[in-house]
């Protein structure tokens, strides 16, 4: 479980779009990224998250989701 911090926010007080990607990439084996095996990625923003929201990050193979209140807010698919 993660808590959205002040430094995660953008000008409209929602998590910055780059933060979603960073949160997910923190769960990837760094060797896969550093070896330049990542071919592409697709991101889908479904619902914004805000200051102090509790979020969870789930991984299923190469698909990541960021969830709040058991609802998917963001999905990321990595293609290696």
Image (tube, grey):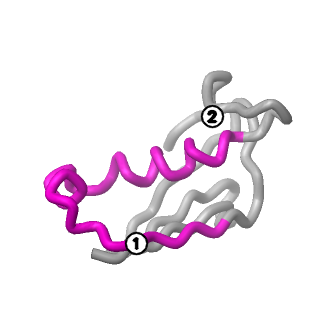
Is 42 situated left or right of 36 in this image? right
Disc 1 packing (10 Å; few <14; some 14–19; many ≥20): few
Q: Residue at x 81, y 33 (%)?
A: 13
Is 74 situated left or right of 65 in this image? right
> Which dot marks residue 4?
2
Q: Quadrant of residue 11?
A: top right
The spot of residue 53 in percent (x, y) is 69, 39
| The magenta stretch spans residue 70 | no
The spot of residue 31 in percent (x, y) is 14, 54
Disc 2 packing (10 Å; few <14; some 14–19; many ≥20): some
Q: For mark 1, what is the residue?
A: 40
The spot of residue 19 in percent (x, y) is 56, 42
Q: With respect to residue 44, does 53 lie above or below?
A: above
Asked if disc 2 and disc 1 are in contact, CB closer than 8 Å, the reply is: no
Marks 2/1: CA distance?
27 Å
Q: Is disc 2 placed on a helix, strand or loop?
A: loop
| The magenta stretch spans residue 33 | yes
Q: With respect to residue 14, does 71 lie above or below?
A: below
Q: Which residues are magenta?
A: 15-44
The spot of residue 50 in percent (x, y) is 75, 39
Mark 2 or 1: in front is 1
Q: Earlier in the sequence, mark 2 or mark 1?
A: 2
């Amino acid at each position: 479980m993660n808590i959205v911090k002040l430094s995660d926010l953008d000008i409209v007080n929602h998590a910055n779009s780059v933060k979603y990607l960073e949160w997910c990439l923190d769960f990837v084996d760094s060797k896969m990224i550093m070896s330049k095996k990542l071919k592409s990625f697709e991101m889908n923003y479904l619902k914004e998250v805000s200051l102090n929201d509790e979020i969870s990050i789930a991984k299923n193979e190469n698909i990541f989701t960021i969830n709040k209140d058991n609802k998917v807010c963001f999905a990321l698919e990595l293609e290696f």
